[in-house]
Amino acid sequence: MNSNLAQQAIDNAISGDWKKASGINIQILANNPDDVEALIRLAKCYFELGNLVPAKKTIQKALKIDPYNLLANKCYSKWKILKSITKRDSKKLPVEMFLEEPGKTKIIHLIHPCDKDVTSLLNCGEMVNANYSGRRVSIATSSGKYIGKIPDDLSLKLRRLNRMGFVYIYAIKSIDNNDIHVFVREIEKPEGYSDIASFSTEKIDYTPYTPPEMLHEKTTITSFNDEADDTNTIPVGLTEDGER
C-alpha cells in the first residue's frame, strides 16, 4: 500500500503538484512516522510551496532517524542558510528530454556562478532561461535571478545560432555548491538549416598510451566543432551573421 502511495507522491512531485504530493506523504507518515523517504519528500513539498520552517523541521526529523542520509543532508545544508522563501513556480524538464543526443544536446559548465543564496534554491531538472544579449550567454531562473554564464566559445556559437533561428531549452543538470552544470537541448531548427548540427556529433576515444597527436578526428563542414575557433566553424555558404 505504502509503495503505491509513495509512487503517487513522486509522480505528483514530478508534475509539480506539490500540494497533492504533500498530502500523500502526510498520509504515508500517519501509518509510518519514521519513513525517512516520505519525510524527505514532504520536506521538499513544504520547500517548494514556500513553507521554509516546516521544511527545515521535517528534514531535521529525517536526519534524527537517519543521520547519514545523503539527500537529507544535502537538503539541510542548502536550506539552513535561508531566512525565508516564497512559493516557487519553476518547471522541470521531462526526464526523457535529458537523454543525450549527438549534435542536439550538450552539458555545459557555467562560469561566474551565483551566490549560495541562489544555488540553495535550485533543483536538478529545473528549467532555466538563457539571455543572448550580452557577450556571454547568461543563465537565469524563471523569476530572473542570475545563475551563471556560458563560456566564451560556446556563448559565441549559441548567440550566432540563436540569430539564425535555432531554438534551445536549458535545465539544471547538476549542482555542487557553486559548481553548476546546465543541460542544453536543441528543439527547433530554422528552415533550410537541417544539415547543421548545434554541437559536435562525435567524441574522440583515446586509446591508452597512444599520444593524442597520433589520433585524428573526422571533421565535417555541416557541424560546429566544439573545440575549434569559431572563425573556422561557419558552414560553407554562410556569413558570420548566419545569412546565406
Image (tube, grey):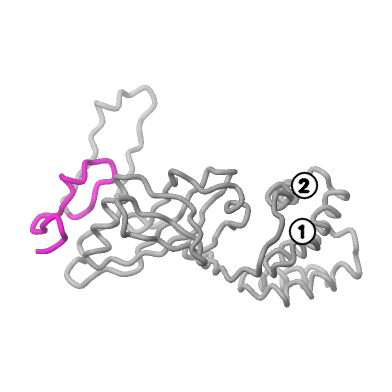
Q: Which residue is mark 1?
A: 40
Q: Which residue is mark 2?
A: 69
Q: Is residue 23 left or right of residue 133?
A: right
Mark 2 neighbour class, 10 Å CA radius: few under 14, some 14 to 19, many 20 or more: some
Query: Which quarter of the picture shows residue 130?
Result: bottom left
Magenta segment boundaries in residue numbering = 222-244
In the displayed structure, 155 sits above or below 55; it is above
Question: Magenta stretch: dominant SS?
Answer: loop
Image quadrant assignment for residue 86: bottom right
For mark 1, does the 10 Å Cα neighbourhood hold few (<14), some (14 to 19), or many (20 or more) residues?
Answer: many
- Placement of 50 over or under 65, stated as above or below: below
Quadrant location of the N terminus in the rendered image? bottom right
Report x, y in % for residue 174.
Answer: 54, 50
Q: What residue appears at the point 21 percent right and 46 percent down from the top-left corner?
A: 230
Identity of the residue drawn at 18% across and 55% down: 222
- Helix or strand or loop: what does disc 1 sit on? helix
Provide residue 125's location: percent of width, then percent of height. 54, 60
Label 1 is placed on what type of residue?
Ile
Task: Check residue 61 in the rendering and tell me which mark sits there, or answer none.
Answer: none
Depth order, front residue of 235/1: 235
Residue occupying image coordinates x 48% and y 55%? 146
